[in-house]
Image (spheres, rainbow, N blue to C red):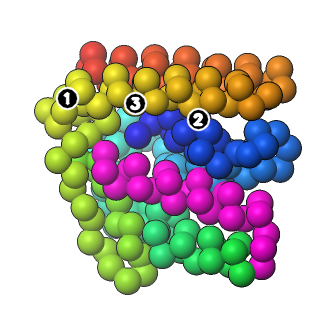
Amino acid sequence: MNTPAHLLIGAAAFARPARGRILAAAVLGSLLPDLSLYVMASVSLFVLGIPEQVVFDKLYFSSAWQTVFAIDNSFILWGLALWVGLWCRWRVLMVAASAGLLHLAMDFLLHAGDGRPQFWPLSDWVFHSPVSYWDSTHHALWVAPVSIAVCAGAYVLLWNRGLSVSAKLFFAVLLGVEIWVARQWLLFF
């Protein structure tokens, strides 16, 4: 799933109230499983000048990058973070970990051929879903409209929770980006 979708859905699912530290925790937990990809791809593309095809066709699938993805996409580690949050009764950590786990669950179901090893450190096994959020050969033409509808619903839910004006604008931009990116995936893949 696209990162903006994760942020919208994670915030709608766990940001109650939709402001302050709880909203920030939901957004951060939704973002963290994808953050390493953005950092590594940005450095590779814009600092090191590595061609896009090399970054996304070779480096993405390299053992070094997959090791990083295994760590930040581990159900085990995110589950441990949730357990610590529950044990310590630290609501911010519970919200962040719950949003991270929701992110992982959606990715588990929607990555066909580009999934990540989500059971690190116990296993390097990767589930290859028959369904993809971006690949039209794996039903993305059906998934994308559902994803956009869910994201729009998440935005309405967040709006009704009394978001600040800046938060409304932030999530509106995320919804717009999600729609645009989903359109691009469908046009080109």
Q: Looking at the picture, does residue 116 appear above or below residue 186?
A: below
Q: Looking at the picture, does residue 160 appear above or below residue 75?
A: above
Q: Which mark is residue 118?
A: none
Label 2 vs 1, first from the N-terminus: 2
Q: Is 100 included in the stretch rendered in magenta?
A: yes
Q: Is residue 36 visible?
A: no
SS for dot 1: helix
Label 2, on which residue? 8
SS for dot 3: helix
Q: Position of residue 184 (x, y in %)?
A: 36, 19
What residue is drawn where x is 14% and y is 33%?
137
| Horizontal relation, residue 85 to residue 120: left or right | right
User: Is disc 3 in contact with disc 1, using a CB cutoff of under 8 Å?
Assistant: no
Q: Position of residue 113 (x, y in %)?
A: 22, 50
Label 1, on which residue? 136
Label 3, on which residue? 147
- Which contiguous range is marked in magenta? 88-110
| Horizontal relation, residue 113 to residue 181: left or right | left
User: As shown in the figure, which amino acid type bears the numbered disc 1?
Assistant: Ser
